[in-house]
Amino acid sequence: MLLPKAVCEGIAEGRVTQAFRRWDKPRVKVGGTQLTPVGTVAFDAVEPADESTLTERDAELAGLKNLATLHKMLARTEGDLYRITLRLAGPDPRVALRELIPEPVEIEALTAKMDRMDKGSPTGPWTREVLRWIRDHPGIVSTEMAAALDRERWALKTDVRRLKTLGLTISLEVGYLLSPRGEAYLAATEPKKRVRRSRAVAPAAGVDGSTAPKATDGSAPVRKARARRTSTT
């Protein structure tokens, strides 16, 4: 069930306690839950409703400006009208999960899950490819990711949400970011790069006779840090 951002915020604040939908049959179940940007929303009741009896208060509790706006929204869809009573049940469990660094047994379980996801995909294996792309391109708009991976954008966004459910990715306002859990998973499963050993060559001395740039405390060579590109626009 699609819940707009403003409605989700109203649910979190306790201002929105119901929603109205036209369906051929109920799409949510009493006692069911749904993950949203503000946390887990619970559905406490799903009941048939009569549009002719709706009031301004009903529109207000649904997060809408007025009753006319509610009638206009309902006119765009067909089916029986249902009143859904809802509330915020708690935080999004994925938020806590993404901070948990997986143990070896969890690494195996995650690998098995993603193997099944790859096997069931009509486009072929995708899970590790998407994780690596997000790691290397944090905060990049999904249209660029879809073009780079030769994927249909909306199908790809659905796949990324599946990785988010595993606690491996974080959704930004624009693009995505690997979670600490996702970073740890890739670090544990990707082949370690071999470092080629070469014959040591004495570096040229600097003006003061030193052979390497030092950190400000003189403890180690200064290395130029690579800035990580992120976006929260």
Image (cartoon, rainbow, N blue to C red):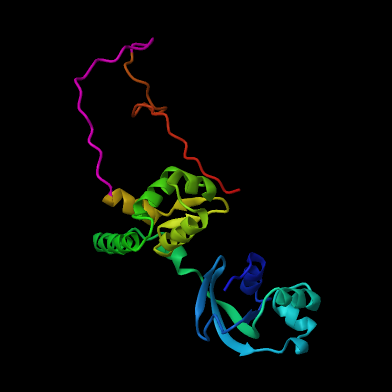
> Relative to 167, is 7 above or below?
below
Residue 204 among magenta residues:
yes
Name the residue: 59% across, 70% down.
2
Residue 129's x, y, as percent?
37, 49
Residue 97 x/y as whole percent = 41, 64
Q: Residue at x 40, y 58 (%)?
A: 168
| Residue drawn at 51 percent across, 78 percent down | 33
Within the magenta stretch, is there residue 67? no
What residue is drawn where x is 45% and y is 65%? Answer: 94
Quarter-of-image position of residue 59: bottom right
Residue 61, position as x, y percentages in the image: 71, 79
Q: Is residue 230 left or right of residue 5?
A: left
Residue 85, quarter of the rendered image: bottom right
The boundaries of the magenta stretch are 190-209
Q: Position of residue 101 (x, y in %)?
A: 34, 58
Nearer to me, 142 or 24:
24
